[in-house]
Image (cartoon, rainbow, N blue to C red):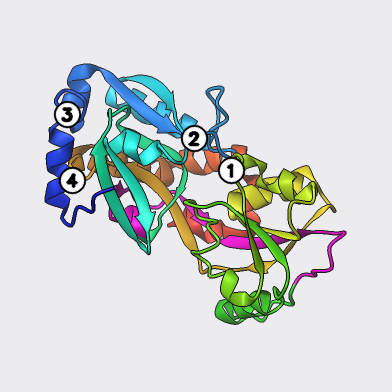
Amino acid sequence: MKRFTTTLLLCITLHALPGLAGDLNDIKARGELRHLGVPYANFIDGRGGGLDAELMQLFAAHLGLTYRYVETTWTDVIPDLLGVQVAAENGGVLFGDAVPIKGDIVANGMTILPWRRQAVAYSTPTFPNQIWLLTTRAAKLRPIVPSGNLAEDIGKVKKILQGVTVLGKKGTCVDLSLHRIAETGAVPVEFSGNFNELAPALLDGAANAVLLGVPDALIALEKWPGQVIVVGPVSEMQSMGVAFRPDAPELLSAFNAFYKTLLHDGSYQKLVEKYYPAVYDHFSDFFTQ
């Protein structure tokens, strides 16, 4: 991996792959919107459904384009968008060798993280997120008593992790290093499987606890009621968004305008209620922005 220190160099890399990149006019000329996605929670189900799948289908129709879903992985999703290898390192990002561009837009419940902001351009936030620590009823951990102060509650959670094995996944929003889990005295356990398998791995005894984003946590609580328990938060509030190439500002602007319309007429809220009804119990204010 070679570190590129300016956006200009990244853009040069993108334009070195003619015919594959492009902004809104190029995409319209091609007649197809390629939606890059990773099957995750209720955002992408891999069968044409999911909150972000339906959102992108609506956006393609709004633009008068054919919709095409392009499945990828968490490791490859940003490279497949940018046409260059990407890796997070010490809070920054490394850009490497050129790779084929496979899509125009990423939408799969992607958390807006500082290192990702150095690589992609994000839309207006589309979904709330926060990282929670979950455990099982059989484990010794118990939920904290909320104080009404988020920073204090995060401190409470981290204070009880001494000697606790905690499951996370590198390169994602539940990367253990992002939340300094090792510094709490916990025993970090890196998960090598699919992101969607984190909660089942906890139930199978892979660790005493697991880091999960709100979408995964809500699904786990619904799927295994009484078996999984939320201990408390380990992060400040976060947001998820749709990712674009930095050299596609017109496509980004078109999406933001479209999304604003969906919010104002209530269409987006209906989609959210279809796939994440429980999110309104925790973050209802987010969808009235």
Question: Which numbered marker is on residue 38?
Answer: 2
Gap in angstroms between the C-alphas marked 2 and 1: 9 Å
Above/below status of 81 relative to 219: above
What residue would you read off at disc 3?
A: 17
Relative depth, front residue between 71 and 152: 71
Q: Position of residue 155 (x, y in %)?
A: 61, 80
Left or right of 31 on screen, residue 195: right
- Under mark 2, the amino acid is Val
Is residue 257 in view from this perspective? yes
Residue 195 is labelled as: 1
Q: Is residue 65 above or below residue 96?
A: above
Residue type pointed to by label 4: Leu
Residue denoted by label 4? 10
- Going 17% across and 42% down the picture, which residue do you hit? 247
Q: Nearer the viewer, residue 213 or 4?
A: 4
Residue at image coords 70%, 48%: 199
